[in-house]
Image (tube, rainbow, N blue to C red):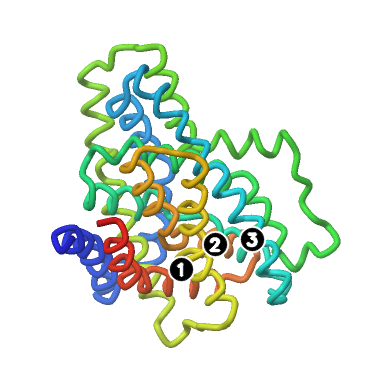
């Protein structure tokens, strides 16, 4: 367990580098924006493509895919709980949708994938990607719709959720990379060496660039501007207690292999999606609330991961 925790500390060390380079004025808003675009539109799609074509065989995927039921139902139940919790605690307009999304959706790639690899090794990647499929589908469809509806200037003009809207969000670069890799693998098309190397070189940039962005966001926000109010605490409750607890309870009904369950538990208890602050700003939602929740969830994870590793091991 100590070795796993030390491996995880490497991830936070890279975030610290991003923070320090922002303090040194090497990184700024433009760099963070460039890194985010690079990750979301190029390195992450290639990483998803490569993971699907290299980590799975057709037979393995068809066997593993049965396990997708547990994360799919757990995310749906967690979202339902977030709706009830937001009403009970009277989360104000302008942050209701953001609250529900952060309560429900995990940072399954930028944090989840490297943490699971650090704890379990490469054998955890297929299971981590199963959770990623459900989490990302929720986040980039219904989640984006909820964030858009937090724009206070659009009061009375709610965005209509439609099948066309869902399809448009499903064709984001990250999900396209996944779906192309999925089809490539299911059709058993050989992956030529130049394409594999190209995808690997760029795909391996995903984690360090993503962690740099988180470090930049923390620096730009400033610790004095972070607010730990009841809604931020509600987000942390959802991320670190409700979400993993739902997975654990569901596993009593939906049996899955031990390693798969442990990966699902770790994936469900990850910090807030690191793109939340950017999306909240872009859609006119409560950016300060999103940023505070993101930063507190990241630092809180240093302590939460100790408990999670004790539970798993």
Of marks 1 and 3, which one's residue comes earlier in the chain?
Answer: 3
Asked if residue 76 is positioned above or below residue 14 in the image, the reply reads above
What residue is at 26 percent from the left and 46 percent from the top?
205
Judging by the rendered image, the residue that carries numbered circle 3 is 81
Q: Which mark is residue 294?
A: 1
Judging by the rendered image, the residue that carries numbered circle 2 is 102
Asked if residue 91 is positioned above or below residue 130 in the image, the reply reads below
Q: Are marks 1 and 2 in contact (CB under 8 Å)?
A: yes
What residue is at 42 percent from the left and 57 percent from the top?
33
Query: At which x and y percent is residue 61?
Result: 39, 24
Query: At which x and y percent is residue 256?
Result: 41, 38
Of marks 3 and 2, which one's residue comes earlier in the chain?
Answer: 3
For mark 2, give the secondary structure.
helix
Q: Nearer the viewer, residue 308 or 50?
A: 308
Q: Nearer the viewer, mark 3 or mark 2?
A: 3
Work out which quarter of the rendered image holds the C terminus and state it. bottom left
For mark 1, give the secondary structure.
helix
On screen, residue 303 versus residue 227, left or right, reads left
Query: At which x and y percent is residue 94?
Result: 69, 70
Q: How many marks?
A: 3
Q: Nearer the viewer, residue 309 or 189?
A: 309
């Amino acid at each position: 367990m100590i070795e796993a925790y030390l491996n995880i500390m490497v991830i936070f060390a890279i975030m610290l580098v991003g923070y320090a380079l922002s303090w040194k004025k090497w990184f700024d808003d433009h760099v963070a924006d460039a890194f985010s675009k690079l990750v979301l539109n190029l390195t992450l799609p290639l990483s998803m493509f490569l993971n699907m074509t290299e980590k799975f065989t057709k037979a393995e995927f068809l066997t593993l895919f049965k396990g997708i039921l547990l994360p799919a139902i757990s995310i749906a139940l967690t979202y339902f709980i977030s709706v009830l919790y937001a009403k009970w605690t009277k989360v104000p307009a302008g942050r209701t949708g953001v609250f529900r999304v952060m309560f429900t959706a995990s940072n399954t790639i930028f944090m989840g994938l490297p943490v699971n690899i650090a704890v379990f090794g490469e054998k955890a990647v297929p299971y981590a990607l199963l959770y990623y499929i459900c989490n990302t589908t929720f986040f980039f469809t219904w989640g984006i719709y909820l964030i858009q509806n937090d724009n206070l200037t659009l009061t009375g003009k709610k965005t209509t959720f439609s099948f066309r809207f869902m399809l448009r969000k499903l064709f984001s670069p990250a999900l396209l990379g996944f779906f192309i890799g999925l089809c490539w693998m299911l059709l058993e098309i050989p992956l030529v060496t130049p394409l594999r190397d190209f995808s690997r070189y760029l795909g391996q940039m995903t984690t360090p660039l993503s962690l740099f962005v988180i470090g930049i966001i923390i620096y730009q926000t400033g610790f004095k501007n972070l607010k730990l109010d009841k809604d931020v605490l509600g987000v942390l409750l959802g991320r670190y207690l409700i979400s993993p607890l739902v997975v654990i309870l569901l596993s009593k009904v939906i049996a899955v292999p031990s390693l798969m369950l442990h990966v699902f538990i770790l994936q469900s208890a990850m910090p807030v999606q690191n793109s939340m602050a950017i999306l909240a700003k872009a859609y006119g939602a409560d950016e300060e609330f999103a940023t505070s929740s993101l930063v507190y969830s990241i630092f809180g994870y240093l302590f939460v991961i100790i408990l999670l590793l004790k539970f798993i091991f």
